[in-house]
Amino acid sequence: MMYSFMGGGLFCAIVGNILLVVSTATDYWMQYRLSGSFAHQGLWRYCMSGKCYMQTDSIAYWNATRAFMILSAMTCFAGIIAGILSFGHFSAFERFNRSFAAGIMFFVSTLFVLLAMAIYTGVTVNFLGKRFGDWRFSWSYILGWVALLMTFFAGWLTLSRCKFLLKYCVLLVISRQYFKLSM
């Protein structure tokens, strides 16, 4: 039972990390109509009339969104590694609860992607949305929100395993104390 929580958490984390990387790397965060033709942009490039160009402007909200998305993917990946290592029993890490660390890393990843999505959403709605009349968020942006949910559930499932282990350890200690007293 306790490994099913961890397995579910790792599955959510792996899917969430893939979605984070795809969302960060692709160019479909926003679509709009510009001079009668459709255009789209991502965090790194914008495309108009079938040609794509690098985002060379150093605009603070793009840089912040990029940084938080990259930090989120890296933190989620570190959580996945810690989660995988929690299945093994390595003597060098006896006092370090890798499951708990993985769960915390997944929640930190969720915080980073939430910050990235909030910054991008706020600036897009308040600034770019008024600049372009006919616009919408696109699939890369939506993948970012789905990744947020996946990393959140990864953290929740992983820490649920820790909660299960904590209850098991408390019951084990109480039963040992009971048997010592009765002998």
Image (cartoon, rainbow, N blue to C red):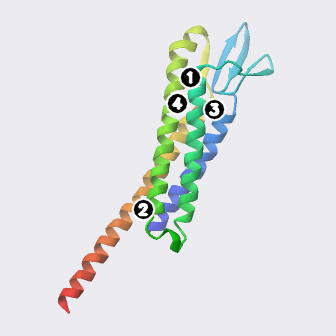
Quadrant (top left, top right, bottom left, bottom right) of the C terminus: bottom left
- The residue that appears at 55% across and 9% down in the rendered structure is 130
Q: Which of 115 and 31 is in front in this view?
A: 115
Find residue 140 and name its label. Answer: 3
Q: Give the crowd class for mark 1: few <14, some 14-19, many >=20 residues within 10 Å.
A: some
Secondary structure type for disc 3 = helix
Q: Name the residue under label 1.
A: 61
Quadrant (top left, top right, bottom left, bottom right) of the N terminus: bottom left
Q: Please name the amino acid that badge 4 sits on.
A: Met
Q: Residue furthest bottom?
A: 183
Find residue 117 and name its label. Answer: 4
Gap between marks 2 and 1 measured at Cα: 37 Å
- The residue that appears at 61% across and 12% down in the rendered structure is 134
Q: Is residue 116 above or below residue 36?
A: below
Secondary structure type for disc 2 = helix
Mark earlier in primary sequence (2, 3): 3
Q: Give the crowd class for mark 2: few <14, some 14-19, many >=20 residues within 10 Å.
A: many
Secondary structure type for disc 1 = helix
Q: Name the residue under label 2.
A: 161
In this picture, residue 93 sits left or right of residue 136: left
Residue 88 at x, y = what percent?
A: 55, 71
Q: Residue furthest front?
A: 92
- The residue that appears at 47% across and 39% down in the rendered structure is 111
Q: In this view, does 98 lie above or below 46?
A: below
Q: In this view, does 30 lie above or below 183?
A: above
Q: Please name the amino acid that badge 2 sits on.
A: Arg
Mark earlier in primary sequence (1, 4): 1
Q: Nearer the viewer, mark 1 or mark 3?
A: 1
Q: Nearer the viewer, mark 1 or mark 4?
A: 1
